[in-house]
Image (cartoon, coloured by chain):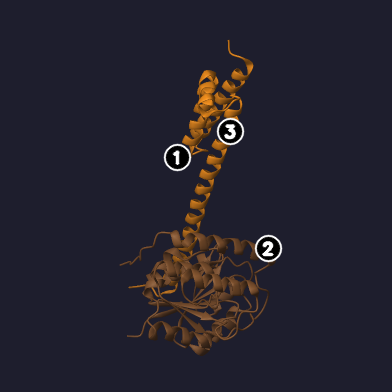
Chain colours: A orange, B brown
Amino acid sequence: MPDRVQLETLVASIGLLLAVFELIRRRKLTEEYSFLWILLGGTLFVVSIRADMLAAAARLAGVANPAALPLVVAVAAILIVCLCLSVIVSRQRQQIERLIEETAILSAELRDLRSAPPVK
Amino acid sequence: MKPAVLCVVVAHNEAPNLPLVVADIRAQQKHLDILVVDDGSTDRTISVLPHLGVRWLQLPERMGVGSAMRAGLRYAARNGYDVVVRVDGDGQHRADDIAALLHALDARRADVAVGSRYQIEQPVRRSQRLLGTVLSIATRQRVTDPTSGFCAFGPRAMRMLAEHHPTGYPEPELRLFVERNALSVVEVGVRSRPRFHGQTSLTAGRIIATTARVALALAIVPWRRRVQEVVRA
């Protein structure tokens, strides 16, 4: 008989997976960045139906209170997601810099071409 | 054969200064091609540019002097220039020192010539003296002016920096980059001059942020991979 906490986490994990699925379907989230979240939702789902796995993992990790383990794992997962997002933002910043530099060069070339007399 | 030299003037909101800076360069170096890089100015710069008789690049957003230099260097590399001189748009770099920078590149076969305001006298600010000492140790050569933006780049440096010029507060990191990539540097004594009009963009808050960035650069740049020189057909 599943207890209430288990039911709640089950609902939460299914909710997360559905939200991710919907975001990908509407193209609000591109596939390349979605795996992180699918992985996170999937792990939460598995842990919520097999609470004994959590207890086993807690024993293995030497954590006395099994309830503390998901907390630690959750914080670690969020940190990893944050780091991934920072990497993505940095890469986008570099791409934007490059694009802006290129547009400046291209518009200068266009200006030169327009002001040059037409070639017969 | 004389090298083709492009003078890159970086400017953010320097509309009153640009005509003076360009006139100063013209007066000293009649045949030098000038490229103004407008780093996302929000003042009258856009309306001033067409009347200067120079070519210009206009960055649609403010990206910082490093990104602006990268655009200028890439423009130079693609248009067949051999040497780039960086002159700031505020008028603090004197055009009569450009000849000394170009001469140093040529005569001392250097990849980069940096104009130093402090070859004779020490910098007034203690933070600059400290930065100079730290950079001297890190690059194993004397750095008297760690924050100088008045410099000339030879062909090799021009092509490397066209892709990899550091951003943010780039001058100290540039010295580290140059050392890391085995480019040779010479310092040339130049005289400083206060900017023509307006205020400097350096404030107390930004100084703290830039100090942190420089410290990070000191720790990281020596561990970066060396970059490849990109030669386009």
Callout 1 crowding tier (Cα within 10 Å): few <14, some 14–19, many ≥20: few
- Could you tell me which chain the residue with mark 1 belongs to? A
Q: CA distance from mark 1 to mark 3?
A: 26 Å
Instruction: Residue B76: give x, y in percent of width and height.
Output: 41, 73
Vertical placement of B209 versus A55: above or below? below
Q: Residue at x 58, y 78 (%)?
A: B18
Vertical placement of B18 versus B138: above or below? below
So how many labels did they put on this image? Answer: 3
Using the rendered image, report if marks 1 and 3 lie on a common chain.
Answer: yes
Q: CA distance from mark 2 to mark 3?
A: 36 Å
Splitting the image into 4 quarters, where does residue B131 fall?
bottom right
Query: Can residue B171 be seen in the rendering of this structure?
Result: no
Describe residue B5's horizontal placement relative to residue A9 as left or right.
left
Q: CA distance from mark 2 to mark 1?
A: 37 Å
> Which residue in the structure is indicated by mark 1?
A32
Q: Which of the image's four quarters has the N terminus of chain A?
A: top right
- Could you tell me which chain the residue with mark 2 belongs to? B
- Could you tell me which chain the residue with mark 3 belongs to? A
Q: Nearer the viewer, residue A24 or B210?
A: B210
Asked if the residue under mark 1 is in contact with the one under mark 2, i.e. CB atoms within 8 Å, the reply is: no
Q: Nearer the viewer, residue B209 or A67?
A: A67
> Mark on residue A72?
3
* Nearer mark to the viewer, of 2 and 3: 3
Q: Which of the image's four quarters has the C terminus of chain A?
A: bottom left
